[in-house]
Amino acid sequence: MINASLIEKTRSGSAIRAMFEEGKRLASLYGTEYVYDFSLGNPSVPAPDSVKTALADIVENTEPLALHGYMSNAGYESTRKAVADDLNRRFGTAFSAGNVIMTVGAAGGLNVILRTLLNPGDEVIVFAPFFLEYGNYVENYGGVLKIVDTGEDFLPDSEALYNAISGRTKAVIINNPNNPTGAVYDEACIKRLAEALDRRGRELGESIYLISDEPYRELCYDGAEVPFLTKYYRNTIVSYSWSKSLSLPGERIGYLLIPSECDEASLIYDAAVIANRILGFVNAPALQQRLVERCLGEETDLEYYDYNRKALYKGLTDIGFECVYPRGAFYLWMKSPEKDDRAFCERAKKYNILLVPGSGFKRSGYVRLAYCVDHAMIMRSLDAFKKLFTEYDNYGKRN
Ligand code: PLP
């Protein structure tokens, strides 16, 4: 028999992937024009032109053996140095290449750091709703996921965090800007979290690591700013990727930042380099490392996402849906008109609208819409949403 937990996962599946597959099925029946697929966080803005130019130049002008060969498991020294310099310039920090490990996207980085930090039975705290893969990644290394709910503002609560930390807590993962809520945790919120972690860590005499998962760092609107966490809490490890910021999700490129002031920083760094190798990643993709080194400072077309964000929020709230005003990432978090968010998503499918149920992110009563889509599709979808909403008007609220 194969691995029992994976057999179980083949049965439960992923809500996001299931909706994505359903979208393809509906499109083959009704035509792409008539399907409103808000399921997947796949960037709808192409990579900047400079990415294409840099790629061509790298392929053309790098000696072939150097271009495709293995390198240090941490990644190219020049790429790691360029990443550190870029962070120092942007955030006034003092990192060096020796703080950076190039990874296979944020997913690869999270797996590397969890493999590095966790012994079986160690606890990892996450705030609901959250990116569901965290549970799988923690389970990969025998860790135990501890879920702390957020309130109506979807911001993590420092007292709830303090109370959830036990002698087995090894790490806390936060994701800012947030998938699925679109919330941005501001400086006051981060300071409260840092203070709770510091206080509890000292009481327990344990190092509690804060893993900051930041694939959406640059996707912020209305002037919202994402604090750089290493400045607020010593034991912070950052996991970043260019999947969203440069629209490169299929290329699998990111990094882990392990600041020298972390407890046992050099041991963590050396162990994480080994984890990168023995998890089978070996190293981050060579070509993509050279590419991001050249494209640091390049930006995605944020205005396009902003245009979508405003249109979708206005369109849905004008109809009568209750939505959380999104300040970051490219997700809209909407209250389901009936308690059972899965039932609501099923009803939405009747109108060819594909949404992801909030219970898939461990918060029922809500749904997630990814607005990294074609703007015209958003505008076309509003009529379908109107019809969907009318069902609830006619039937009375189901709550
Ligand atoms: N973390 C969050 C919160 C995400 O939403 C995603 C992808 O959607 C990832 C991590 C994984 O990112 P990557 O494609 O860089 O592995």
Image (cartoon, helix red, strand yellow):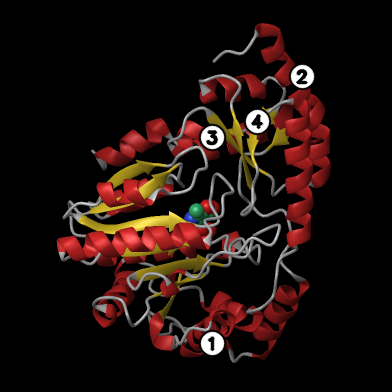
- Residue type, mark 4 in image: Glu
Q: Residue at x 66, y 39 (%)?
A: 38
Which of the marked residues, 3 or 1, is nearer the chain's N terminus? 3
Q: CA distance from mark 4 to mark 2?
A: 16 Å
Q: CA distance from mark 4 to mark 3?
A: 25 Å
Image quadrant assignment for residue 345: top right
The residue beneath circle 2 is: 387
Which of the marked residues, 2 or 1, is nearer the chain's N terminus? 1
| Closer mark to the observer between disc 3 and disc 1 | 1
Does residue 251 appear in the picture of this structure?
Answer: yes
Which of the marked residues, 2 or 3, is nearer the chain's N terminus? 3
For the residue carrying disc 1, how many other residues have a C-alpha within 10 Å: few (<14), some (14-19), or many (20+)? Answer: some
Residue 18 tag number: 3
The residue beneath circle 1 is: 85
Q: Position of residue 295 (x, y in %)?
A: 65, 79
Residue 310 tag number: none
